[in-house]
Structure formats: structure tokens, C-alpha cells
Amino acid sequence: MDAYGLLDVLGQDWVTEARAEVARRPGAIGRHFASAGRRAGRAPLDGAPGWRADEAARALLLAALPPEDLTERVAVLYAEGTADEKLAVLKALPLLPVGAEAVLLLRDAIRTNDARLLRAALGPSARHLDQAAWRQAVLKCVFTGVPLDGVHGLDERADAELAVMLAGLAGERAAAGRAVPADAAALLDRLTQQKEARCASSTRTST
Amino acid sequence: MRIFDPHIHMTSRTTDDYRRMAAAGVRAVVEPAFWLGQPRTNPGSFADYFDSLLGWEPYRAGLFGIRHHATIALNPKEANDPRCRPVLDLLPRYLDKDGVVAVGEIGYDSMTPEEDDAFARQLALAIEHDLPALVHTPHRDKARGTRRTLDVAAESGIPPGRVLVDHLNELTVEIVKESGCWMGFSIYPETKMSPPRMVEILRRHGPERVLVNSAADWGHSDPLLTLETARAMLDAGFDADDVDRVMWSNPVEFFGQSGRLDLSGADQPEPAFQGSSILRGGS
Ligand SMILES: [Zn+2]
């Protein structure tokens, strides 16, 4: 969903007015961004799956920033943000003209112990993460019980190395009499089948 | 029984404490910014601390269905350290934020001129940001310190109904009651204030504008003394409505004046991520 779609679903006039102010005077975003929770409320938005009202309001404020120093402002709002504010920045990234610079924010979010931030960091913007960092983040999801359905493009990006790591975790868990979450076990199955299929086809071509 | 602990330093408590508090009926807490035992030497240390009060702690509390809010301030003790004074310039940014329901803890520790200045400036910030104020009273020279606290608060122009004066006892309750400010009592193991003494104060002064907290921190303290006080109230013949007033409605009313108290979902653990590693012990 783009910013206009989100604005429509949210349907709060103050956001439209605040966006106009932010576009004229970017420094005005601070107070609007900080108070967006109590102004917009925190209810999930029916017309925008995965978005809460406060997150949508904050994302729309960010999307109203002029492009010139947008990346720096977004980085500061993230760095100085509460958990809710950080979450909104991460969710907003796909709506913003922020490129590979987003990677510092993603890495910060992945380092935290807040499952919501970890999950949000693995949205579409995670394409900026290198493969090693991405694998570690996915493994951390499995370890901490964060569902993998939030990982953007999971099957396209999951590779043999991730399979090795998942198998290792599954082995440790089994030794402790515990299982990995069902979605991780299923991913490991798919990766194992792909590998077997590849081995079988390479065996065929070599004979 | 539902309990709102309006003064507890969860930063210093373990995740197991959250679990025990939730089991005891604690559904909401306010964590005031205070000092950490070890003096801080630069404003950045405070920024990280404030960020944790508005990030990590609400998250940790939410895993147990406890709503967590914070009060933000430069505490009286560290207001005396010139290296920490620039924290006052950081405050406006924090006082705009959603999870902040008061300016605090402010007030006096040793009643120095530096404390006078920081107290007055932060009362002005409370007015400017439309927030109530949580005021700590000194543990030494308490009676005179409390009187001076009330004078300075009155001078600032903040309405008394938006001021909570904390850590009171039998000798300081009367003047705070007369002032129109709210009265906070911190229940400690052994020292300062106990559940039976608290019940006696409630018997004498009634439950109006009275808040009870555990003030639990890194020192000798117990986050379940709110529950113990509630039980002592029932044993002494107070009815369930009186208990609910002191343990829930009064803090809701006081901090609700901020317009930022959000108790939706209190009592419901965060639905997702129940396997989160902090419930099991870190990753
Ligand atoms: Zn305290």
C-alpha cells in the first residue's frame, strides 16, 4: 500500500494538516511524530493489514518530509525514538526514498531484544542486508519465536547455509527435548528437499 | 484485585519480578526516572536511560500484560552535578513523547541552590508540556523539605491537583493534604513505611488523593508490597471499593491528567511472540 492509500484508510484530518506543515517546515515533524500515538490511537487499521493507526500516522509524517535531507531526519527520529516510534520508522521504510542507508537502522533493530523490531526489520527493506546478516536475523526469529510469515521473500532468499544453521538449532533443541517452531521446521524441510532435488539432478547429469 | 503501582523502578528489577507482579494483579506501572546508584557523568547516559524507559521496559512489561508508562526528569541528586546539568536541555524532546505521563522525579535531596533551580525549571517544563509533576521528598530533613517542596510548587503556578508529592509519612501527610496536592506513600520492607502504618494513615485521612507504591528499585525493596498493603486494608475492614480506589482509580485519575495514559490491553499479554527469549532468559 502506498502513502495515499494509507492516508485514505487512516482518514484523520490532523495527519493531512501535519503533513502539509512538515512538507513546508521539516523541523516541525518532531512534535507531531512524538504525539502521534495519543492523537491517532493505536487500533489496528481494518483497511491496511499489519498497520496500527499510530504507525500509519507516523509513516505518513515521514513520507511528507522533503527528499533533500530525508535520510538524515529519518535516522535521527529512529535513533531518538521510543519503541513505538522505531517500529513506525521500520514499517515506513518501503514508503520512503531511503536506499542502502536503511541498513544501519535494520542492523540496530535486529540487535535489539524487541521481537516487534526484529520482525519489522525483515520486511521488504531487508534486501539491503547482506546475506550473512539476513541469515542471522532469520535464525534469531526462529530462536526467539518470531513467526517467519513476516520475513519478506523468505523462500527466494533462504539458502543452503541457512539450512545448515536451522538444522543445527533443531539439533540443539532436540537434545533439550524441545522443538523448533513449526514454521521453521517447515522451512528446513523445504530447503532439505530442494537440496536433495538438486543432488538428484546433478547425479543424473553426471552419469 | 487490580493494582496500579504508580512508582516502581523496573529497570532495576528482573523479568521474574514482572511475572510475579502480573500474578499478583499488577496491571499497570509508572516508572519514574531516578538515579541508578552509580553516578552518571554525561547527558548521553541519561538519554540511553530515558530511551530504555520508553522502549525496552514497556516492551518487557507488555509481555506480561502490564502497561508501562514513565515520568522523565533530571533527579534532585544528580541535579547537583555540573556534568549532568545539560540533561535539562534534553528534556523537552522527551516530554513530548506518548509514554510520558509526568515530569519526575523532581524535588529535593539535600536542598541545595542547584536543586532549587532544577526543581523550578522542571516545574515550568511540566506546565509548558501540559504534564503533571511527580515530586520526591527528601529522606533526610523530611518535614522541612516537604514544606519547602510545597512552597516551590505553589510558586511555580502548577495547580496542586497536578502535583503528586511522594514518600510521605505520618509527619508529612497533613501539610500535603491541606495543600491540595496528591499524596504518595512508598511501602518499604522494614524502614520508612509499612503496610500496617499505611492502613492507619488511610483510616485517619481517608483514601481521597492517596496513592500507594512499592518504589521498588535496586535497594532493599519489594514489588509486591502494594498487594500486601491492599490485603492489610481488607483485613482492617476497608471494602473492595476503597482498595480499588487507592490501588487503581487514584493513580489512573492522577496520571490520566496527562492525556497520555493508555490502559488498553492492560491484562492482556502481547499476543504474539510468547516464545520470546526474554521469557526464557535472553538470546
Ligand atoms: Zn523513586
Image (cartoon, rainbow, N blue to C red):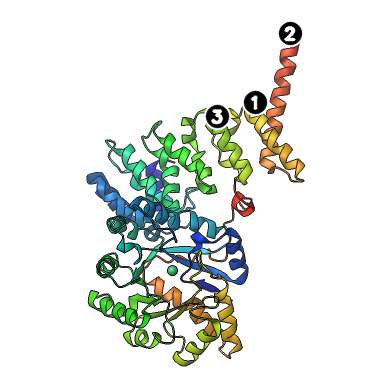
Whether disc 1's CB lies below 8 Å from ligand 1 is answered: no
The answer for which chain carries disc 3 is A
Q: Return the residue nearer the eye: B53 or B188.
A: B188
Image quadrant occupied by the C terminus of chain A: top right
Element class at badge 1: helix
Q: Mark 2 sits on what residue? A: A206
Horizontal side of A166 relative to A125 (left or right) equals right
Horizontal side of A129 relative to A161 (left or right) equals left
Q: Nearer the viewer, mark 3 or mark 2?
A: 3
- Please tell me which residue is depicted at 46% across the width and 38% down the height of the picture: A106
Q: Mark 3 sits on what residue? A: A132
* Among the 4 quarters of the image, the one containing residue B91: bottom left
- Distance Cα–Cα, label 3 vs label 2: 31 Å
The answer for which chain carries disc 2 is A
Horizontal side of B277 relative to B137 (left or right) equals right
Q: Mark 1 sits on what residue? A: A160
Element class at badge 3: helix
| Residue A44 visible here | no
The amino acid beneath tag 2 is Ser
The amino acid beneath tag 1 is Ala
Q: Nearer the viewer, mark 1 or mark 3?
A: 3
| Residue A104 visible here | yes
- Circles 2 and 1 in contact, beta carbons < 8 Å: no
Q: In the picture shown, does residue B243 fall above or below A85?
A: below
User: Residue B255: x and y, percent?
Assistant: 40, 71
The answer for which chain carries disc 1 is A
